[in-house]
Image: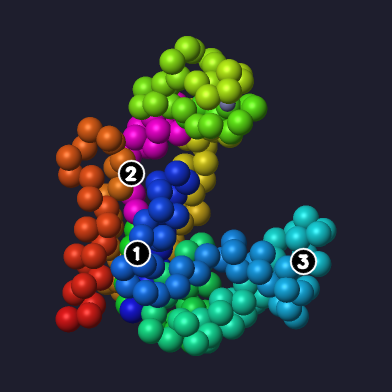
Amino acid sequence: MNIILIGGPSVGKGTYASKLKKIYHIPHISTGDLFRENIKNETELGIKAKTYIDKGNLVPDEVTIDMVKDRLSKEDAQNGYLLDGFPRTTAQAEALESFTKIDKVLYFTADESVIIARVAGRRICKACGAIFHTTNIPPKKEGVCDYCGGEIYQRPDEQPEIVKERLNTFQEKTKPVIDYYKEKGLLAEIDANRDINNPKFRVIEDCQEVLDQLKA
Ligand SMILES: [Zn+2]
C-alpha cells in the first residue's frame, strides 16, 4: 500500500508514522531524512542538492523528485511505503503519479486551539533538556526543573503567535495538494485532536480502518 502522510506542524505525524510502519511493515520515507542521507552519502543527487542548500536556495523540484523516485524503487518499498513531506505542490503530485500509484492520502488535522495549547504550553529545561508542560506536566516549582534544578524556558518558535503563523503558512501552502487528492477520491482525513481528555483520541485505529480497506 502506497500511502502519503500529510499533517501540519505539531500534529504528531512523526509519532503516527513510526507506529504505522511497524503495523504494516512498510518504510517511512520522509523527504527530510532523504535529503540528509543523500547528502551524507554524497550521492550524485545529494551533491546536487547540497550546492543549492549551501547557497541558501531552494532545491529544484526535479532534484527532489529524482530523490523520491530513486528511494521508491528500492527493494524495501516494493510492498508499499509511507511517504512524508512530499508532494508539497500539485506539480510534484503530478510528477509522483508518473512513476508510482498512490493508494491513499492520510491527512492529519487538529484544531488550531488544540495545537496551540499543546505547543505553547511546552517548556524545556535549559540544562538537561527535560520537557514539561504548563498544564499537562507542570514542574513542581514554577520555572525550575524537577530533575536538575535548571531553568525552564519556552522555545521562541513555540510561542502562540509563531505557532499560529506556522499553521497558517502550512494550510495555505498545502491546500492545493489536499484539494488535488480530494478530487481524486484518495484523501482520508484523520482527526488528530490531541486532547488528553478526549476519549475519542484514536488516531492509529482510525488510520487502520482506512488502510485495512485497501487490503480487502
Ligand atoms: Zn533539568
Judging depth in this view, the residue of 215 and 169 nearest the camera is: 215
Classify residue 178 as left or right of residue 195: right
* x then y, percent, for residue 144: 54, 16
Q: Quadrant of residue 18?
A: bottom left
Could you say whether the residue bearing mark 1 is in a helix, strand or loop?
helix
Is residue 59 shown left or right of residue 27? right
Quadrant containing the N terminus is: bottom left
Name the amino acid, label 3: Lys
Query: Distance between the Cα atoms at labels 1 and 2?
Result: 19 Å
User: What is the number of the mark on residue 110?
Assistant: 2
Q: Residue at x 73, y 68 (%)?
A: 40
Check disc 3: other Cα within 10 Å, few if <14, some if 14-19, many if 20+.
some
Q: Where is ligand 1, by quadrant?
A: top right
Q: Answer with the quarter of the image where residue 110 lies.
A: top left
For residue 178, say whether it is visible: no
The residue under label 3 is: 50
Horizontal relation, residue 193 to residue 126: left or right = left
Q: What residue type is disc 2 on?
A: Ala
Of the pair 3 and 179, the residue shown nearer to us = 3
Please identify the quarter of the rendering in which residue 135 is found.
top left
Describe the element under mark 3 as helix, strand or loop.
helix
Q: Give the numbered dot on residue 181.
A: none
Q: Nearer the viewer, residue 89 or 214?
A: 214
Task: Return the x and y of residue 21 as percentages of the image width and height.
Answer: 38, 67
Viewer-proximal residue, 138 or 30? Answer: 138
Circle 1: residue type: Leu
Give yes or no for contact between labels 1 and 3 (Cβ–Cβ under 8 Å).
no
* Residue 117 counted in the magenta span: yes
The CA distance from mark 1 to mark 3 is 31 Å
